[in-house]
Image: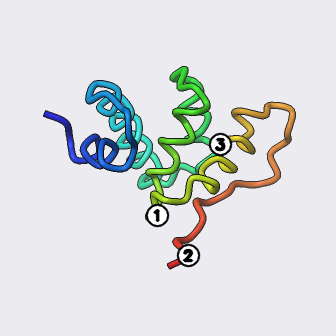
Amino acid sequence: MPNPTAEKLLVFVGGLSPEYAQQLAHHIDECRDLLTAGTDIDTVQQHLKDQDVPIIAAILITRFLGDHPSSLQAAREIVECSPARTPDAGRSGTRQLPADPR
């Protein structure tokens, strides 16, 4: 039986198998725990890369870390601009997940 995060993924993302949704949910829950513990988003992105999570999956995972799962563009920018994905870019500070625009 999928956990609540996997069930949410299956509702919001068409075409996912329950097994893949469960794998993504594991990463989402793990990253939420890291953020709750005070880890910055760039370090979370490095963690995903270290786990060999592909960039498309990292975007989907990041999308579900915030309070607004419809913000795919914000998630894409976080992942693509992360020092983990662009090692040439120097760290100019840490970024936060964008606030829910509602």
**Which of the two residues, 54 or 50, is positioned nearer the viewer here?**
54
Considering only vertical position in the picture, is 23 above or below 5? Answer: above
Mark pair 2, 3: CA separation: 19 Å
Do the residues bearing badges 2 and 1 touch, measured as CB atoms within 8 Å? Answer: yes
**Which of the two residues, 27 or 93, is positioned nearer the viewer here?**
27
Q: Position of residue 28 (x, y in %)?
A: 40, 42
Q: Amino acid at mark 3?
A: Val
Considering only vertical position in the picture, is 83 above or below 99? Answer: above
Q: Position of residue 93 (x, y in %)?
A: 76, 54
Which numbered circle lies on residue 79?
3
For the point 64% across and 47% down, the residue is: 76
Q: Amino acid at mark 1?
A: His
Do the residues bearing badges 1 and 3 touch, measured as CB atoms within 8 Å? Answer: no
Mark before the other along the chain sequence, 2 or 3: 3
Which numbered circle lies on residue 68?
1
Considering only vertical position in the picture, is 66 above or below 60? Answer: below
| Residue sitting farthest toward the top | 52
Q: Secondary structure at mark 1?
A: loop
| Mark 2 neighbour density, 10 Å: few (under 14) some (14–19) many (20 or more) | few
Q: Position of residue 98 (x, y in %)?
A: 60, 65
For the point 52% across and 71% down, the residue is: 100
Mark before the other along the chain sequence, 1 or 3: 1
Return the residue at label 2: 101
